[in-house]
Amino acid sequence: MSARNAQAVPIDATLARLLALHPKRIDLSLERIERLLAALGNPQRRLPPAIHVAGTNGKGSTIAFMRAALEAAGTRVHVYTSPNLVRLNERFRIGQDGGGQLIGDAELGEALAECEAKNGGAPITVFEMETAAAFLLFSRHPADLSLLEVGLGGRLDATNVIERPLASVITRVSLDHREFLGDSLAEIAAEKAGIIKPHVPAIIASQAREALAVIERQAARLRAPLRIAGENWTATEERGRLVYQDEDGLIDLPAPKLYGRHQFENAGAAIAALRASRLKLPAAAYEAAMVRVDWPARMQRLSHGRLADLAPPDSEVWLDGGHNPDGGQAVAAALADLEERVSRPLVLIVGMLSTKDCAGFLKNFSGLARRAITVPIHQEKTVPAVELAEVAGKAGIPALARDDLESAITLAGQLDLHPAPRILITGSLYLAGEVLAANGTPPE
């Protein structure tokens, strides 16, 4: 199919057809994607060497740090992440000299159409089709390295067809997606540990003891060398800088551009993974990564845009896609640090899905937020704003419900708070995508 023909069929139309191929949007299995990849000539076997990243929180940030360091060192790196915030293209970054670029509409449309044709109408999920398209695209563009983020879980995730990555990374594991991964940390950790491969180094962020025990057993079975945070490597904040240390030595770096204490560990996991992969990056590349790293909707300051301009002139507007209790804890800690630096009353604008632990997420902000303003998300499983306001109230945060983001931000500016408030929009990556689109500042 030519680029012109791909452009003639909008990507959204292709995705709408693909949604009809399987009754479930999420159905963890490797059988369907292995069948499709075989029909495509197994492009996953022709990728540049890969680093594979799983975990509950911090996967995308860890990949963003790795990409920033690699590109600063002149490495061409392909990146596959999910979910996207505004456009599907965000999931597919093609490595080029001088830095990567998001895939264009025409080439993405052509790859999806080719996968659709080879699939022949057989049952398959949209994520599996998108992953196959990523492998197809990455196999056709020369690059030095690939960074692959697990979509959900690990063991049966579509990305787990990669047979021998340079390294496997497991970021913080916590309770999320219980309907697919299990009700306990041990069960969820077992799914995440499914990406560990025989004799391939595995980099493990700090974990609850229950999760770490499962990961250690899996690594021992496969004789995969472990590099565990706090044991084999450390990444700590010292005098406003990031100090990383492992058996190969110490690196003293600027604080990460991504805000929050949790980003020090994500940066550390990225450095540990690159060093375990025997990629000899100069210290200057890691320094540049801390300053240049970009990952939208993770404690992102919205300083301009249509929505940001609705807030009072002296206020702050922040955006974070956190949506589970551990993610809420990390964001609340980051806000507490901001409060110590510059004190402002905190107003939450929150939208969440019914599949999430709304009460567990919101209780992290009790005693920190003056008010919550709840909004619906334009998704099938959104929690109604009035219902979410009741959950916030029970968590100790006085709450009001509004029908949309515009009226919520306007209300935040009318609460007669002094000084002008610090507004955090949070609770869902879907909501974060709506914010970036409406604000006119989508990821580039």
Image (cartoon, helix red, strand yellow):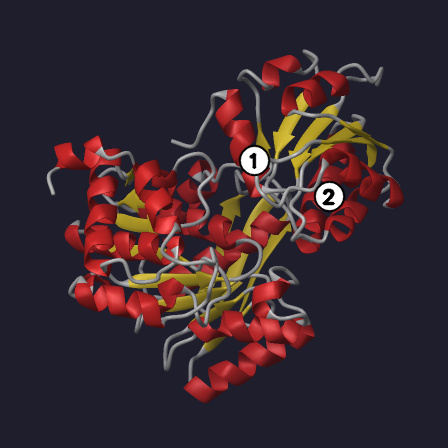
| Point 54% across, 31% down: residue | 434
* Image location (x, y in percent) of residue 72: 33, 43
Q: Circle 1 is placed at which residue position?
A: 432
Position of 333 with respect to 154 (left or right) is right
Instruction: Classify the position of the C terminus by image quarter.
Output: top left
Q: Amino acid at mark 2?
A: Ala
- Farthest residue toward the left? 2
Q: Nearer the viewer, residue 292 or 316?
A: 316
Say how many tags the image has: 2
Q: Nearer the viewer, residue 251 or 233?
A: 233
The vertical placement of 200 against 172, above or below, is below
**In whole angstroms, how far apart are the C-alphas of marks 2 and 1?**
17 Å
Instruction: Classify the position of the N terminus by image quarter.
Output: top left
Per the image, label 2 sits on a secondary structure element best described as helix
Q: Nearer the viewer, residue 20 or 182?
A: 20
Tell me whether the residue at label 2 lies in contact with that at label 1, contact meaning CB atoms closer than 8 angstroms: no
Which badge, 2 or 1, comes first in the chain's sequence? 2
Per the image, label 1 sits on a secondary structure element best described as helix
* Image location (x, y in percent) of residue 287: 43, 44
Tell me if residue 138 can be seen. Answer: no
- Farthest residue toward the top? 313
In which quarter of the view is residue 177 placed? bottom right
Q: Amino acid at mark 1?
A: Ala
The vertical placement of 8 against 161, above or below, is above
In which quarter of the view is residue 419 placed? top right
* Image location (x, y in percent) of residue 277: 35, 66
Label 1, residues with CA under 10 Å away: few <14, some 14-19, many ≥20: many
Q: Nearer the viewer, residue 22 or 308?
A: 22
Label 2, residues with CA under 10 Å away: few <14, some 14-19, many ≥20: many
* Image location (x, y in percent) of residue 443: 43, 32
Q: Circle 2 is placed at which residue position?
A: 332
| Point 47% across, 55% down: residue | 25
